[in-house]
Amino acid sequence: MEEARLWLCEVLKLTKGSRPLPLAPFDGGTVSATWRPAEGEAGVALALAGGATWRVAARRDGPALRWSLGTDSGKPAAEGERPGGGGSHAVALRRRGAGLDALVDGQRVATVYDAAGAASAAVWSASAATLESVELRAQAVPPAAELFATDFGAPTLPGKQKDEVWRLLGDVFHADAPGWSQPLAAKDEAPRLVGRPANGPIGLWYRDEVPGDAGLSVQLAALAPAARLALVINPANGYRLELTRASCRLMRGEQVVGEAKLAEAPYAARLQRDGRWVAAEVDGHRLAWHDPDPPPAGKVGLRLEGGKAEVEHLAVTAENAFASTFGVVDTAWREDGGWLWNTGMACIAWSYWITGDGRQAPSMLWRREPLRGDATARVYVSEFTEGYDRGGETHQHYAYHDVSLVLAGDGKDFDSGYRFVVGADGGRCARLLRRGKVVAENPRFTIVLGGHCNEPRSIYVEAARVGGKLTLRLNGAEAIAFDDPEPLTAEGYVAIGTERCRANFSDLSVLRRPVVGS
């Protein structure tokens, strides 16, 4: 992510009880301060135009570092503690749209939303303190994990099985009523999705439920005067961002929780849930609402009534998540063992993947950043081949098995946390280990190398943890369901890998389970 330093002060001395010291105005970026907490409580602040002044602060409390995020008045919106240590620590506030992230030592610890206008930054201290460095950086909004995106340039895309083709309308997105089409673009005209409701509202829904903090964004080419287009997260009493040519409304069920007038027809719109918050942005207009009773996860999609709409870009996203296609080298992962990027494949029309080579020793790919809370992980895994399936060329398929997906790991050990194994013991079963001990397995799910290729050739793996409930689904069928009476910690690292073979991986996503209820 590209950043630009706006302001840096390497040493800044604050007197006891100093008032916030203004630094500079900015609308998006990070203000951070580094100091030794033994010298007292200090922090950074963002004063929003026409709104509140938000502060994040930290202080030493025995061996721990206590932090808080709140405004000048009232109790903190969030507070907690992290390991203290004896050295210097950094606190920061990051502005991304209407969101405000509190960071302690580079880790996001809390988020609030405030749709007020441009901010100005400041530092402050409750006692005499010397700040070792104070810094402002302008930066792009950290992107949400992108689960799927399209500009409607093609009506189909390659599937994940041999000779499989996915239709954009019908397989990836499902219509609940006639009226959606993907017409052939005229010369010099961008392709687009067209919705024409005839007899009431029409909906278009992403194929997979998004079991996390789901989001949806669109770019519109046209919206008819009488049309009302809604971006929807969980149609059963969830969230909607309703768009007309003159206004936008943020809805929770049938309750309007935010609205704004538009000077012209909308072009770019985004709806996103984030913990107990739901936020929307329409051409620079920001709306946000704190939900005291967030709904469960559900479907995401579009709902159109009243007139025609033309969409030129559509993306399904998730906050508090990460997604890697493995189409390009992704430095957010740490490689242990042998890994190859985009090696040759026959029979299956994958155009991107990463290969784990565990023939000599286990190969593991660890996410560098820990994940906090319950999560759902999804990934495609397939057999490894050499050569190509074209003309008179020959190719060979190799056995794949003992494929692992780890949740709540320690970032080092294969058998830390919860380890789901697909094709364990050379392909004979599905298995779950808890800190290296087998707690569940199912012999009905096998991987077998036949005379030419494996059966199955590829598997869609979905592993989930909700409290002590662990589940594994393979190609949509439940393979393991286990209730842990003593659940492991909800913070840890995610990994994929393999042993005693080679296997290909693509399109991995890991989503933190959303906050639900009061």
Image (spheres, rainbow, N blue to C red):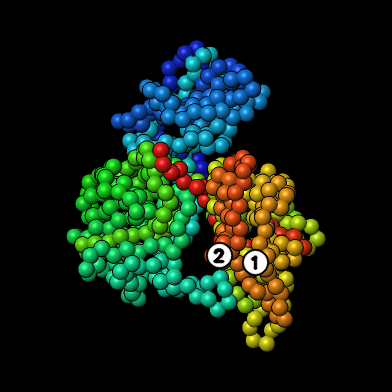
Position of residue 5 relative to residue 380, above or below, is above
Q: Crowding at label 1, few (<14), some or many (≥20) Cα neighbours within 10 Å?
A: many
Residue 445 disc label: 1
- Residue type pointed to by label 2: Ala
> Mark 2 and 1 residues: CB-CB less than 8 Å, in contact?
yes
Q: Residue furthest top?
A: 16
Q: Position of residue 71 (x, y in %)?
A: 40, 26
The structure residue drawn at horizontal position 27% and vertical position 61%, both measured from the top left corner, is: 304
Q: Position of residue 492 (x, y in %)?
A: 62, 43
Between the residue at mark 2 and the residue at mark 1, the CA separation in whole angstroms equals 10 Å
Towards the viewer: 353 or 267:
353
The local secondary structure at tag 2 comes to strand
Q: Is residue 11 visible?
A: no
Label 2 sits on residue: 477
Towards the viewer: 28 or 148:
148
The structure residue drawn at horizontal position 56% and vertical position 42%, both measured from the top left corner, is: 372
Q: Position of residue 353 (x, y in %)?
A: 61, 64
Towards the viewer: 59 or 185:
59
